[in-house]
Amino acid sequence: MILETIRLALQAIARNAMRSTLTVLGIVIGVAAVIAMVTVGQGSSDQVTADVEDLGTNLMILIPGGGGMGPGGDAYAAPFGMDDVEALIEQLNSIETAAPHDRMVVNAVAGPEEHTTSLIGTTGNYFEAVNWPLVLGRTFLSTEEYAGRPVCIIGETVRQGLFGNTDPVGETMRLRNVTCEVIGLLEAKGSGSFGNDQDDVILIPARAFQRRVTGSTDVTMIYLAAAEGVSTARAMEDVIALMRERRRIGPGEDDDFSVGDMEQFASMLTGITNVLTGLLSAVAAVSLLVGGIGIMNIMLVSVTERTREIGIRLAVGAQARQVLMQFLVEAIVLSMIGGIVGIVLGLALAAVAASFLSIPFAPDVGIVALAFLFSAAVGVIFGYFPARRAARLDPIDALRYQ
């Protein structure tokens, strides 16, 4: 009985192939969009987690401004200085190392080649703090750091843009009006959490950055690494206590700085990603509602067109529930076809997006199953009214219908 009903439903759909295709487009688009959004969102979260693991679980970030990591901090807070960095290293046993981090976009020139990239002012401690080794050359010497000598370490993307596959160590480049000697090449990292190229970077000593590029002694961010065997929670308590003392913050006054570890930072990024994914998925799910209305509309038209057929079936002994089941199954089959096509299309779009953004392709079987079941539910909900209308037709009136 069920198989025969499904066969009749498929025949009815095939007779109006173009109309059926247009009818299920809403279901296809809705299911595909939801699956693609959720899959890309999960891939982004996985990439954030992987990036945090690469940086190390003992890494912390100290920035001016209260309110924690992320939006909502003070409109203005005094920046740090190099003396703050030195104090963190010298006065806290819970801190293994600390490094300043200031960034700006510059145009690097080497011979006839030009490349726009990020310039970071820091110290040799930075490479230890963020666990980023070199594959060629060396890091900054202490004498170069204190003298502010213009030496630089470049990422793989900068090397390819300026020097190709050649060894860049010993070469020179111009950063604005500063001539810089390349002393090292960073190990390639690839894309970050949001598709950013982590290798598109040049690092120079912090004092050279301050004196020759910005003309300021401000430090806008400090990277910290907790000592071995010390939890980041304890290290952050020590950092907060020291910075409150150095910045003369009295009892009961709010901090004008924020410190957080990578777990907090990853949680913040993952939370933002999940919220955006949820909002986009909710918008995409509206297409399923539109698709369901389209199915109801086309089934009502189908009932009208097939009134004589329904009348003949009822006249020769078909029961009302059999007619209802026929049209209900037809609506469900339409929705399920749209769901299957939408799943395939959504996974394909997610795979392309993951490749383009350089994030993991992380399909969620639960979401795929839920999308399929939801598409079937759309068929049941929006197909029931037209099916009930067909089942309630009077056989005599149906046979008279022209």
Image: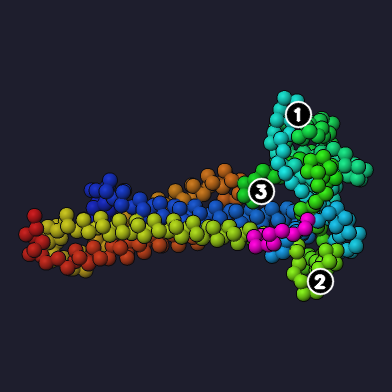
In the rendered image, the residue lying farthest to the right is 143
Residue 347 in view (yes/no): yes
Q: Secondary structure at mark 2?
A: loop
The residue at 46%/51% (across/down) is 346
Q: Nearer the viewer, residue 168 or 383?
A: 168
* Crowd rating for badge 2 (residues with CA inside 10 Å; few <14, some 14–19, many 20+): few
270 left or right of 17 in image: right
Amino acid type at image mark 3: Gly
Residue 10, disc: none
Q: Is residue 76 magenta?
A: yes
Q: Residues within 10 Å of mark 3 (few under 14, many from 20)?
A: some
Where does residue 30 sit, x and y in percent of width and height?
41, 55
Q: Which residue matches tag 3?
A: 192
Residue at the disc numbered 1? 110
Residue 356 horizontal/vertical position (percent)? 57, 43
Q: Amino acid at mark 1?
A: Ala
Determine the CA span between mark 2 and mark 3: 39 Å
Q: Earlier in the sequence, mark 1 or mark 3?
A: 1
Mark 2 or mark 3, whichever is nearer to me: 2
Q: Nearer the viewer, residue 172 or 32?
A: 172
Which residue position holds label 2?
250
Q: Is residue 143 left or right of residue 8?
A: right
Neighbour tally class for label 1: few under 14, some 14-19, many 20 plus, Cα within 10 Å: some
Question: Which of the marked residues, 1 or 2, is nearer the chain's N terminus?
Answer: 1
Write down the region rendered in magenta: 70-79
Q: The C terminus appears in which quarter of the rendering?
A: bottom left
Relative to 274, is 16 above or below? above
